[in-house]
């Protein structure tokens, strides 16, 4: 698994990588995560169930992504692929240059490759045009592509000019046991409880950036507070747009109605969600939005903009949709608040329904099928790779062919300078023995010492 986005950074991609890796380990596979260093977290680390993470030394640019280099990571990635005896390289997120580089180098080494797209992108500005061209370069020579929603699939197929048969839809999921409603909350079937409440809390947990619709949030909070004196907002997350929210609170004198709690660690998200009755998502674009599933699992009513793949995520009775416009969002929030006083569904019942719909075990099983299929495909000859790259554009195609040729020459140089036979094979983590020791409760007496060099 390769991506710029992994723990300790927080987000949907990070959660996806971790939980998918854990389920694949439980299914008997060896999984390695490759990402860039986060502060003091560098080198090789082990996390839950022996999941090994390589935190590569790299300069971090915009939004925790490394700058594109295409060649600088090849020596260390080659060492990892050989050392860990990798069969499949699975890249995540189109905004991750590390992901694109890993897939590119893996194809040069003859490895199987897979890519999962977690976001939606447009076609009408320079940044998206360049990003789509890079994506087309990467996906023109790949075994299979996974998207998290049907809307995301349509978007990726158009951006990268792919054959739809080479793209599968495997949605995100949640660990439902970690997002259970508060068992100590009063029974919401008692209508008098809602009428006697001192306040209704609307929870927002998001990166406070433009793409998440924070400008819309700034506009609707004063209007909702004016319509409903008992409504409070609890906002978790951080980002460039937080200053706009703070200025709105100052200008509208809403210090007692709007509370900021800053960045929220993933294991604390549930404790924040259960403090509210409504979850608000104002995103301008979303491929899936795992946050609304987590909130629904906690028993909250959902208000969301009707964008991207969000309409595919939850059944209509769990969510109130609005267009990404100020007036329509105020209408949807008002509708959710009014419905809260007449709420008929127990949060536990909603949690059970979400638990049946989403499971990481199911995601891992379907991803495993993709791996089985691509490992049966014959590796194309180098001339076929050049033909695919050449079709990426009049000028870009020629540049991509030159890059592929240089990458092959670089690989030959590395194989001569440091033959693969001289690379020490890393020992596998004793997952089965660790699990048995944990079940016996004597893992403290079965110490395992693994020394890893990179």
Image (spheres, rainbow, N blue to C red):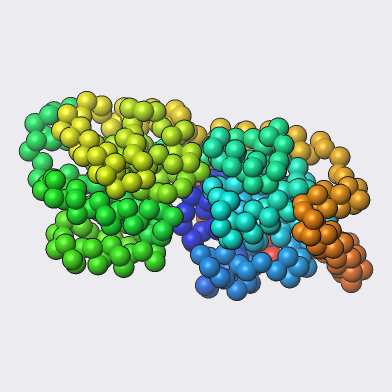
Residue 263, image quadrant: bottom left
Query: Quick check: 260 above or below 23?
Result: below
Answer with left or right where residue 112 lies relative to residue 259.
right
Residue 421, image quadrant: bottom right
Residue at horizontal 46 percent and vertical 29 percent from the top: 357
The one nearer the camera, 136 or 182, is 136
Residue 83 visible here:
no
Query: Quick check: 213 above or below 288?
Result: below
Image coords of residue 129 (percent x, y): 62, 56
Residue 132 visible here:
yes
The one nearer the camera, 441 or 232, is 232
Image coords of residue 445 (percent x, y): 55, 55
The one nearer the camera, 205 or 44, is 205
Q: How many marks?
A: 0
Answer with left or right where residue 270 lies relative to residue 16.
left
Image coords of residue 156 (percent x, y): 62, 43
Image coords of residue 349 (percent x, y): 31, 27
Query: Quick check: 118 above or below 6?
Result: above
Answer with left or right where residue 147 lies relative to residue 454.
left
Residue 344, image quadrant: top left
Answer with left or right where residue 335 lies relative to residue 288.
left
Residue at horizontal 74 percent and vertical 62 percent from the top: 77
> Split into 4 quadrants, where in the image is the C terminus?
bottom right
Residue at horizontal 41 percent and vertical 58 percent from the top: 210
Residue at horizontal 87 percent and vertical 62 percent from the top: 405
């Amino acid at each position: 698994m390769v991506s710029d986005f992994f723990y300790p950074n927080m987000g949907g991609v990070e959660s996806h990588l971790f939980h998918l890796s854990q389920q694949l380990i439980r299914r008997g596979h060896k999984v390695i995560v490759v990402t860039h260093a986060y502060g003091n977290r560098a080198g090789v680390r082990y996390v839950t169930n022996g999941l090994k993470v390589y935190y590569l030394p790299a300069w971090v640019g915009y939004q925790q992504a490394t700058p594109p280099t295409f060649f600088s990571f090849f020596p260390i990635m080659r060492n990892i692929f050989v050392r860990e005896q990798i069969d499949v390289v699975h890249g995540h997120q189109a905004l991750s240059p590390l992901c694109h580089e890993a897939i590119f180098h893996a194809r040069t080494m003859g490895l199987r490759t897979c890519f999962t797209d977690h976001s939606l992108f447009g076609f009408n500005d320079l940044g998206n045009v360049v990003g789509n061209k890079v994506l087309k370069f990467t996906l023109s020579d790949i075994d299979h592509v996974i998207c998290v929603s049907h809307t995301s699939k349509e978007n990726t197929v158009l951006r990268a000019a792919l054959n739809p048969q080479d793209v599968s839809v495997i949605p995100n999921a949640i660990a439902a046991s970690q997002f259970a409603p508060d068992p100590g909350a009063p029974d919401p079937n008692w209508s008098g409880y809602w009428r006697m409440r001192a306040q209704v809390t609307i929870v927002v947990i998001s990166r406070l950036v433009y793409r998440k619709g924070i400008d819309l949030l700034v506009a609707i909070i004063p209007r909702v507070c004016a319509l409903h004196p008992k409504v409070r907002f609890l906002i978790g997350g951080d980002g460039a747009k937080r200053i706009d929210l703070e200025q709105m609170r100052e200008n509208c004198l809403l210090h007692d109605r709007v509370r900021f709690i800053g960045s929220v660690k993933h294991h604390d998200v549930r404790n924040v969600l259960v403090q509210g009755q409504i979850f608000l998502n104002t995103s301008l674009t979303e491929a899936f939005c795992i946050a609304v599933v987590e909130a629904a699992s906690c028993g909250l009513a959902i208000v969301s903009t009707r964008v991207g793949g969000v309409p595919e995520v939850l059944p209509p009775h769990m969510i109130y949709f609005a267009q990404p416009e100020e007036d329509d969002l105020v209408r949807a929030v008002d509708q959710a608040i009014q419905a809260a006083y007449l709420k008929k569904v127990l949060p536990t019942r909603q949690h059970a329904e979400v638990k049946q719909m989403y499971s990481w075990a199911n995601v891992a099983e379907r991803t495993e099928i993709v791996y089985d299929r691509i490992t049966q495909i014959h590796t194309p000859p180098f001339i076929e790779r050049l033909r695919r790259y050449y079709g990426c554009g009049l000028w870009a195609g020629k540049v991509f062919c030159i890059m592929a040729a240089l990458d092959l020459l670089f690989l030959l140089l590395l194989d001569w300078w440091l033959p693969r036979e001289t690379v020490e094979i890393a020992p596998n983590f004793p997952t089965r023995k660790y699990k048995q020791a944990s079940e016996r409760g004597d893992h403290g007496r079965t110490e395992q010492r693994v020394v890893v060099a990179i």
